[in-house]
Image: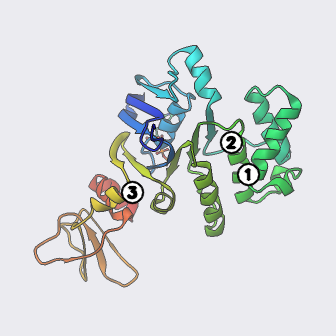
Amino acid sequence: MTDLRTTPTVSAAGLTLRYGRTAALDDVSLRLTSGVTGLLGPNGAGKTTLLRVLATAVSPDRGAFTVLGHDPATAAGRHEVRRGLGYLPQTPGFHPDFTAFAFVDYVAILKEMTDRAARHREVRRVLDAVDLGDVRSRRIRRLSGGMRQRVALAAALVGDPGFLVLDEPTVGLDPEQRMRFRELIATAGEGRTVLLSTHQTEDVAMLCHRVIVLAGGRVRFEGTPAELTARAEGRVWSGTERDPGAKAAWRTGTGAFRHLGDPPEGATLVEPTLEDGYLLSLEASEASEVAA
Ligand SMILES: Nc1ncnc2c1ncn2[C@@H]1O[C@H](COP(=O)(O)OP(=O)(O)OP(=O)(O)O)[C@@H](O)[C@H]1O
């Protein structure tokens, strides 16, 4: 039997996209499988650009990719990729006077669901799936930030897409809403491929079976969260003074400094976290910016 967790559903090779002198994507290759993969990276890493390429919103200058066996380089392939795709952009273009139902219905129309009764059933299904069934007739401007984000997720789930692309969906949510939203993403990742862009290692630790670290338009790491953490084994130490030889260092709540890099002789090593593994996969300047 084919193992869905290891068979690639999305494959990309050599994706490159430049904006003037900036290489937003620089020779990016990756393989995604069923389940939630985290796309972790600092500001300007190229995360949004990569998601937009995979969502066929923009074409790469070089490189190729396939989604669920379809090649978007051809018009027919692009159409199929779009039919099988759910995309939650960083700033969903809501019309605030629309009700939640009307907005998701509008997205369903764009997804070519022409049969009105079947479409309305689908809109109710996805709104129920994100626990918004009770407020579906409420206008979007009267919904909380967390609810609006769930409307956007419902819209992305219309038509039961095989590939779901989520661009920093937990930004701006309070801890309770974030937790709620993570549960919905975990459910959405059952039996489908989800690519979740985030700044937060917590999102990755709680949700993802795979993680890709992107920085400066390049893939710095691809593997499991445990493998990313293991990269920091023996490379995290604590001390009362800042060690100038560390790749990144910051003062923790206890007043001691936590250091990342190559420890000096006799250093007090500490247990690494996913965040340490992430920071160590970045360049020193990027890591100190993220750690600051
Ligand atoms: N339309 C554009 N025109 C010019 N430069 C762009 C454009 N879109 C992105 N860039 C540049 O490409 C690089 C990657 O940007 P991108 O938005 O993909 O990063 P990101 O990882 O999503 O960042 P953030 O976490 O801040 O959203 C950045 O240097 C950005 O300034």
Furthest residue toward left: 265
Mark nearer the N terminus (1 vs 3):
1
162 displayed left or right of 17: right
* Structural crowding at the residue carrying mark 1, measured as other residues with C-alpha within 10 Å and reported as few (<14), some (14–19) or many (≥20): some
Asked whether 274 or 240 is in front, the reply is: 274
Residue 80 position (above or below residue 240): above
Residue under label 1: 129
> Where does label 3 land, which residue?
225
Q: Secondary structure at mark 1?
A: helix
Query: Is residue 172 among what the camera can see?
Result: no
Label 2 environment density (alpha carbons within 10 Å; few <14, some 14–19, many ≥20): many
Q: Amino acid at mark 3?
A: Pro
Label 1, label 3: how far apart the Cα atoms are: 28 Å
Measured from the top left, where is residue 156 in percent x and y? 67, 41
Q: Amino acid at mark 2?
A: Leu
The correct choice, above or below, for 114 with respect to 4 in the image is above
Is 160 on the left or on the right of 211, as rendered? right
Q: Secondary structure at mark 3?
A: helix
Q: Quadrant of residue 12?
A: top left
Q: Check disc 2 and report the residue beneath it.
A: 157
